[in-house]
Image (spheres, grey):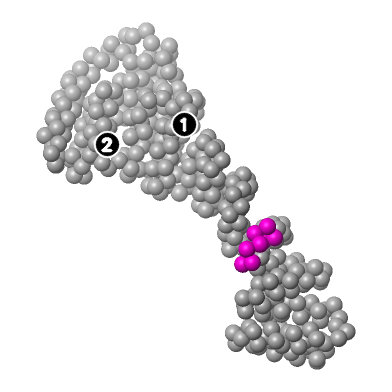
Amino acid sequence: MTAGCLTAAQAQSLRPEVGKPLQQASELLRAGKAKEALAKVREADAVGGKSAQEQLMIDRMRGAAAQRAGDNATAAQAFESAFNSGKLSGAEQVQMAESLAFAYSQLKDNARASQWVQKALSLGSQSAQLKQLQAYLQGASGDYSAIAKDAQGAISAAEQAGRRPEEGDLLRLADAQQRTNNTAGQFATLEKLVAYYPKKDYWAATLGRLPRKAGFSDRFSLDLMRLRLATGNLTKTEEYMEMAQLALQAGYAAEAKQIVEKGFASGALGTGAEAERHKRLRDLAVKQESESSASVDKDIAEATAAKDGNALVQLGSVLASAGQADKGISLIEQGIAKGNLKRPEDAKLRLGRAMMLGKNKSKAQQTLRSVQGTDGVADIARLYAILAGQS
């Protein structure tokens, strides 16, 4: 028997003075007449000497009719009586616990609603609506530690089962972590969001918070802008200008030229009061690219003769950004092999990005995920690895 539905066979199993009004109540409910149905339930309940089975049928019908009539107090009382009868099957217990959770939420009794949510979940409920109610109740309580624990549990369970976590669970966890000042945890959750749901807004949130992470180094400012450009989050005139200037300052003249050209193509550069300034920046990028190309053989020879591999790593990274990925990868690998590097983890980051530019996704991800560090290098590397998997 489902709540609010009584079959003829079930009605016949009861005494006529109980079964007949309950059957009529069931028909009235199907006709949308909840208040009239309640009156018939009261008629059945007035019969003396009821058996436990008859009382269960009455309670279930009363609960269904009262809930549809908007009388949630009566519905909750009836459903609790039915639940406590000890005569419900496992599936019926789940259904009843869910009904009680929603009835108490309508009565604004969030504490008891939460208790019945937990009961339903412990009995195996998989209701999406119940999970939404749970999230609402947790948010209303302000218990963000509980929200984080619940969302993290759902995410971990999905990942262990080889499934993509629910987007809503990731968002709930990120919000709860922000409210509990768990900055590191929130960033890790945002990384999962861009990995599983690579939306522009999620990338924007992730990249916007990364520079505020403790210990993050300014030397990765250009990498941040590269990621913003690749994810559609770099659109303003001043952003194109800043990125191109950063690239020029770091020795990436060809990349600076590419950035400026993208700015002109998008309309962000080349118009307005600063149009002449934009053209001067483009001319500078073109000039520096030409000079860099003319001296590349000499630069390689000098880097090869150096005592350490730093110049080879830098030169290889520059060439990879200029569209010569294979040559750039070779030089970076030579630099790493030579050793005595100022920042070995940065070198692995540069190698991974060069492999990504060379469309060697699997090697790029393997290299990038091996990068270690607490100054932002590992964070940037992981985001590049995620982006490589999405390209």
Distance, label 1 to label 2, CA atoms, is 21 Å
| Image quarter hosting the C terminus | top left
Q: Is residue 249 above or below residue 303?
A: below
Q: Residues within 10 Å of mark 2 (few under 14, many from 20)?
A: some
Q: Position of residue 188 (x, y in %)?
A: 51, 38
Q: State if disc 2 and disc 1 touch (CB < 8 Å).
A: no
**Residue 264 lies in what quarter of the image?**
top left
Give the residues in magenta.
106-113
Amino acid under disc 2: Glu
Say which element carries label 1.
loop
Visible residue check, residue 91: no
Residue that appears at 32% across and 12% down = 304
Q: Position of residue 57 (x, y in %)?
A: 77, 80
Left or right of 359? Residue 298 is left
Mark 1, residue position: 213
Q: Position of residue 8 (x, y in %)?
A: 73, 88
110 magenta-colored: yes
Say which element carries label 2.
helix
Nearer-the-camera pick, 331 or 55: 55
Residue that appears at 61% across and 86% down = 33
- Sequence-first disc among 1 and 2: 1
Amino acid under disc 1: Lys
Q: Position of residue 127 (x, y in %)?
A: 61, 63
71 magenta-colored: no
Left or right of 352? Residue 147 is right
Q: Residue 244 got which mark?
A: none
Residue that appears at 21% across and 32% down = 257
| Image quarter hosting the N terminus | bottom right
Mark 2, residue position: 239
